[in-house]
Image (cartoon, rainbow, N blue to C red):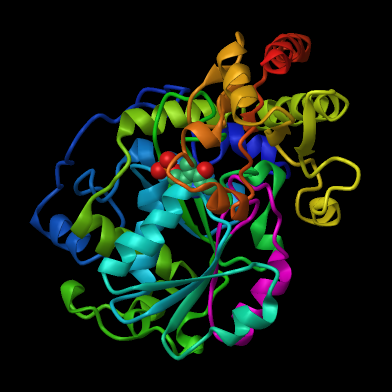
Amino acid sequence: MKYQSIDTIAVHGGHTPDPVTGARAVPIYQTTAYQFKDADHAARLFDLAEPGYIYTRLNNPTVEVLENRMSMLEGGTGAVATSSGQFAEFMVFTSIAEAGDEIITTNRLYGGTNNLFFSTFKKLGIKFIGIDHDDFEAIEGAITDKTKGIYLETVSNPGNDIPNMEKVAEIAHRNGLPLIVDNTYPTPYLCRPKDFGADVVIHSVTKFLGGHGNSMGGVAVDLGTFDWAASGRFPGFTEPDPSYHGVVYSETFGNMALAVKMRVQIMRDIGGCMTPMNAFLLLQGIETLHLRMERHVENAGRVARFLEGHPAVERVSYPDLDGNKNAERLKKYLPKGSGAMLSFELKGGYESGKAFIEGVELATHLTNLGDTRTLVTHPASTTHRQLSTEQKQAAGIGEGLIRMSIGIEGSEDILADLEQALAKAEQV
Ligand SMILES: *Cc1c(COP(=O)(O)O)cnc(C)c1O
């Protein structure tokens, strides 16, 4: 049966009751390997001539439910789950690029992604070029013969900026390049990148998808929209792979060529697979994604409006507020609302920020996001501590900036906690 609603996919996608036992929940296949039927069966599996299980680094029935559910949620042709969101990024870019190649990205990225792109990939010889996501001329101008893709965050972490995905996709496709997006902040419940031209979607499942702050995981979804052969830029897809008896991915696997290549090359060789136990816990979270996101959005909207009217607060950054520069794009790309993430600047600067972060009682001070619980961070004393005041200013990080991931508690309790912590921040 084809599901009409993304809510139904979140609950059922990719899973039917176990045919042997009738188990209704997704069983945890806590096994490393799988018995072959005979020597020919084993040989066919190793030739990729028949689907099946060999070794959990390559695939696992519990992890596969998560992969198929994520692929269905994003409208893809296949997905590969990973040990973390960071590894999903690593897997995608090592599948499409090699030393000497280039990837165009933005200068508004999650800190971990920023390090991976500009430090670790640099050592591997893959060059990332960071450009303002609204400077379309510069993006197109940076494309060379070596470029293999363009990368964006659908809503940027931590700035909450929404790029013009459709426009960037058009530039990418005109130049024979795939658009790869990180859809971690909105999740497929709030934003469907496939509708706006994306070809590959990456998630940190650690965040809102898992949603309970208990398990790390990532996933990369092949949306099946990009024609690797027609582009002419991807010999890795159109020429024989000697490590698989000369298989040509774009010919043999068509619109799921990337999904297969990520698994059989990068997972096989580098590892970084998701564990069955984490897949089970993350699937448990995904089953209530739609309910949680609805409450996250409702609570975050209330908090944003409360903060906007508070005398200790200089300004609030949340796309769904009157006058926010992202308001138009919000309507188009995230019609159900802007999600749980917001930030605000305290009038009292660094000391106020510290008093606030130490003053919260319900909210938790840590660096994570996308939990059922309300979380707070003070970037100036933690994640952005090493930057000079000028660098912080350039990155839009004020001394009194607070970032929040609004949880799904009762909003009256969240607001009461903020009220009392803001009173402490005002006293310093
Ligand atoms: C957290 C995060 C990542 C990295 O994911 P991990 O699961 O922590 O490895 C990547 N992108 C964004 C936008 C994130 O918030």
Q: Which residues are magenta?
A: 153-182
How many discs appear?
0
Q: Residue furthest right?
A: 322
Residue 424 in picture, x, y percent from top left: 68, 11
For residue 315, which quarter of the picture?
Answer: top right
Residue depicted at x 26% and y 64%: 265
Image quarter of the C terminus? top right
Residue depicted at x 25% and y 51%: 58
- 192 vs 306, left or right, is left
The one of 46 and 396 positioned closer to us in this rendering: 396
Residue 353 in picture, x, y percent from top left: 62, 26
The one of 151 and 354 positioned closer to us in this rendering: 354
- 65 vs 341, left or right, is left
Residue depicted at x 51% and y 49%: 110
- 177 vs 35, left or right, is right
Residue 243 in picture, x, y percent from top left: 17, 73
For residue 422, which quarter of the picture?
Answer: top right
Q: Is residue 232 above or below residue 72?
A: below
Residue depicted at x 76% and y 49%: 334
Q: Would residue 275 be seen by someone viewing this image from the given angle?
A: yes
Q: Is residue 150 above or below residue 85?
A: below
Q: Would residue 373 be seen by someone viewing this image from the given angle?
A: no
Q: Is residue 425 above or below residue 46?
A: above
Q: Residue furthest left?
A: 39
Residue 294 drawn in magenta: no
Residue 216 in picture, x, y percent from top left: 39, 34
Residue 167 drawn in magenta: yes
Image quarter of the N terminus? top right
